[in-house]
Amino acid sequence: MDILYRKLADELASLINAGGFQSGDRLPGVRNQALLRGLSIATVIAAYRQLEDWGLLEVRNRSGFYVKTKPAAAAAPPRIVVTTMRPAPVTGQDMVLQLIKAANDPAVVQLGAAVPAAEFLPTRAIEQALTKAARQYRVRTANYEFSPGAPELRRHLSRRLADAGCAVHPDNLVITNGCQEALTLALRAVTSPGDVVAIESPTFYGLLQVIESLGLEALEIPTNPHSGMSLEALELALSRWPVEACVVTPNFSNPLGCLMPDAHKQKLVAMLKAREIPLIEDDIYGDLSFSHARPSLLKGLDENVILCSSISKTLSPGLRVGWIAPGRYQDKVEYMKYVLNLATTTIPQLAVTELLENGQYERHLRRVRGDYAQAVARMTDAIVHYFPEGTKISRPEGGFVIWLELPGDVDSFALARKALGQGISIAPGPIFSASQKYRQFIRLSCACVWGNRIERALVSLAGLL
């Protein structure tokens, strides 16, 4: 057996190194491999374990053996932009509409909007779940599913949160139209027009639009590409300004992809709790860790943290199913949800329930985490290869976006306009800042189907630079 397993391991290692199997590819199952080669199951398992020891394979729980994603090419991380911290109204968000329109244009190479390509989503399983929901709940789906939303969906979400170390009763969850609505409800519940909200910088431009629409002022806190919001800078800001709320994405923030260490999470929660400042947690990327370990939630440290999330980045953006755990603002959020749009559509809620109940969601996560890790590594490698020397790239630990600092005196707004003229959509840095910082930065989405079209787009961007 020793000779047979080593022979198989050597053969498969040669195939992997020669490109016969690509990063993220699934190897044939143990039984199939044994039948194919006339070997015992024990021999195949021993060979696969040897490939694991060599760093060529990884095991995904209940999913199989996969070719390990190679680390992305080394590149310096983007710098932390530190300026005078002063509350300011949000400006310069008009280009976002162009990004969204471009995301619906099949002629445009989509690198701007953080919308996963359909190939990353379980479209067949979603179709089956929608069909089953429509057939099984024919009368129910014709009616409103008034706030707080479908009880069976809230029960499954409560169980998932419990698995992540966060106890939230199903009755304390409200179903929303995506995470964007959840963030809107959270900020409406804890602020009034003119209030100051502390946010990460750079931050998700959708949050900036919510702040702008509510007449709030944003206080940008410098954010580290590795550890998240600077707690020292936040403490200084809290001592100088009347902050009424703080919004953070501690798990794989957009656009940096950083993961806040547990010790920082504890300090952040304690700092705001001591000052009685509401803390709003955006966890939309929390299920997309490259390490397959689900990171902890701020909500698990304090029940009054307001948790917002959705399945838009993991399962389907089109279903528009999100949720909010509002803590002590439960009654206020339920009422505002009703006033805003009465209810979230019933069929998608029941379809998501089905995917959670039958295990399809978890199976999809086990696959797509590796797919996103591979996509980020591949895009990073290409940028290192094609872009000018001095380009700096974030190293996300989850999600599927990367943040680039471009060398020289580059205006990313001008670059985005020129790129769109060549049929390429990118996200310029200033839209991730309330005060339009980050002129030399861009964000790229890696959740696209790799091929000559994407590679040519990157070559074109490099040419524009």
Image (cartoon, rainbow, N blue to C red):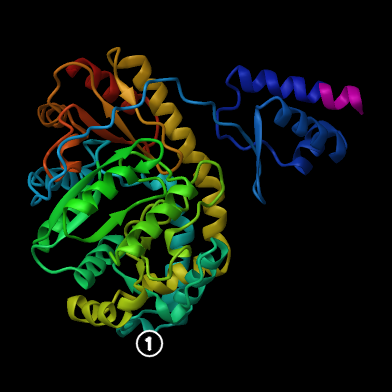
Which one is nearer the viewer's eye here, 92 or 29?
A: 92
According to the image, label 1 marks what residue?
Answer: 139
The quarter holding residue 77 reads top left
Q: Name above or below for residue 457 compared with residue 203.
A: above
Q: Residue 228: x percent and y percent?
A: 36, 43
Residue 337 belongs to magenta span: no
Whether residue 119 appears in this view of the structure is yes
Q: Residue furthest top?
A: 389
Highlighted range, magenta: 1-6
| Most common SS among magenta residues | helix
Which amino acid, mark 1? Val
Q: Residue 102: x percent and y percent?
A: 18, 42
Q: Name above or below for residue 407 compared with residue 236.
A: above
Whether residue 206 appears in this view of the structure is no
The quarter holding residue 415 reads top left
| Residue occupying the point 43% across, 59% down | 298
